[in-house]
Each structure stands twice: as structure tokens, then as C-alpha cells.
Image: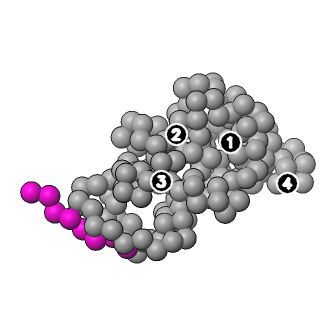
Amino acid sequence: MSRDVEITARINGESVTKRVPARTSLADFLRYDLELTGTHVGCEHGVCGACTVRVDGDIVRGCLMLAAQIDGAEVETVEGLSASGELADLQAAFLERNALQCGFCTPGMLLAASELIATQPGAGRKEIRAFISGNYCRCTGYEAIVDAIETVIKQRNGGGAANG
């Protein structure tokens, strides 16, 4: 017997109230109940990063959280952050540097990159690689992704070089 729970949260700035089965993951809730398909489901074990979203300002793995846990929270997905313009320079750099390939990892990678830039605005290539190491990409070999993130860090720092 499945027990349903009612969730009220702000998703990408809009208030949402829905009833879902208690065991529904946040990633499934976003994809299937709200049709926010930028949140991808990959490994379902929290290791690939494809389901990365922001909850109350922190990036989390949507496959490891239950939808019921966001009751009263603020959730931002790649769709919301794209619409707000927060990711515009990262998206442009990913396109310019050919860092998106198949695109499956891209939403989670963009959220991780955004978090990195916000918390370590002077990060260099070594720090970028370490920070995104929890996001798997099977297409690019990461070099183009690191290039794109480094480009944005340099641009946001006025064109100066990022640290090593």
C-alpha cells in the first residue's frame, strides 16, 4: 500500500503543491510530475551528478532525496537557472568550447560549475577538476568542460588568470 504525501514548495520561483507517493525521489518528481526534464536520472545512486539540483541554495543529488523532503523548500533546476540568466555565460562557454557533446551530464555539470564559481571564484584547473569530479561525463574527457568553466571564471574576474 502506497502512502501519499502533500508537498508545497517553490520550484524555480513558482509555488507548487502536489500529492505524490511518499517514496518518490525528488528527481522523479521534477521530471515526471512537473515535467522539468533537465534533471536527468543516471545512476540512481548519487554518484553520476546527472540529477543535480539546488535546494535552499545548496546543490544536492535529486535521486538521493525524497520529494517529501522539499516540503517548504526552494528548489532550483537547470530550467529555472537558465530562465533567470544565472547560467547564461556558462551555457555560452560550454557551447563555444564544445563541452556539451551528448548533453546528458550538462544540466548537472552546469549546476556544479555554478556552485564552484560562487564558492571558489579564483579556482584554477586543478580545483575545477576536483570540484566536478562527482559529475560523470562519458563524452568529452572533461578537458572541454574544464576549459569552459575556466573561461567563465576568468571572464567574471575581469579577464585575469585563474589560479593554477
Sooner in the amino-acid sequence: mark 3 or mark 2: 3
Q: Which residue is drawn at 39% across and 36% down?
A: 43
What residue is drawn where x is 27% and y is 62%?
20
Question: CA separation, marks 2 and 1?
Answer: 13 Å
Secondary structure under the numbered disc 3 in the rendered image: loop
Residue 48 vs residue 25, the one in the foreground? 25
Number of other residues with Cα within 10 Å of mark 1, as a class: few under 14, some 14 to 19, many 20 or more: some
The residue positioned 76% from the left and 44% from the top of the image is: 92
- Real-space Cα separation, disc 3 to disc 2, in angstroms: 22 Å
Task: Tell me how far mark 3 sits from mark 1, CA to CA.
Answer: 30 Å
Q: Are marks 1 and 4 in contact (CB under 8 Å)?
A: no
The percent position of residue 33, horizontal first and vertical second, equals 36, 57
Above or below, comparing residue 70 to residue 35 in the picture: below
Q: What amino acid is at disc 2?
A: Gly
Looking at the image, is mark 2 or mark 1 earlier in the sequence? 1
Q: Name the residue under label 4.
A: 157
Q: In which quarter of the image is residue 125?
A: top right
Q: Name the residue under label 1.
A: 127
**Could you tell me how far apart the alpha carbons at marks 3 and 4 are, in whole angstroms?**
32 Å
Q: Real-space Cα distance between discs 4 and 2?
A: 25 Å
Is residue 119 visible to us here?
Answer: no
Question: Amino acid under label 3?
Answer: Leu
- Above or below residue 144? Residue 119 is below
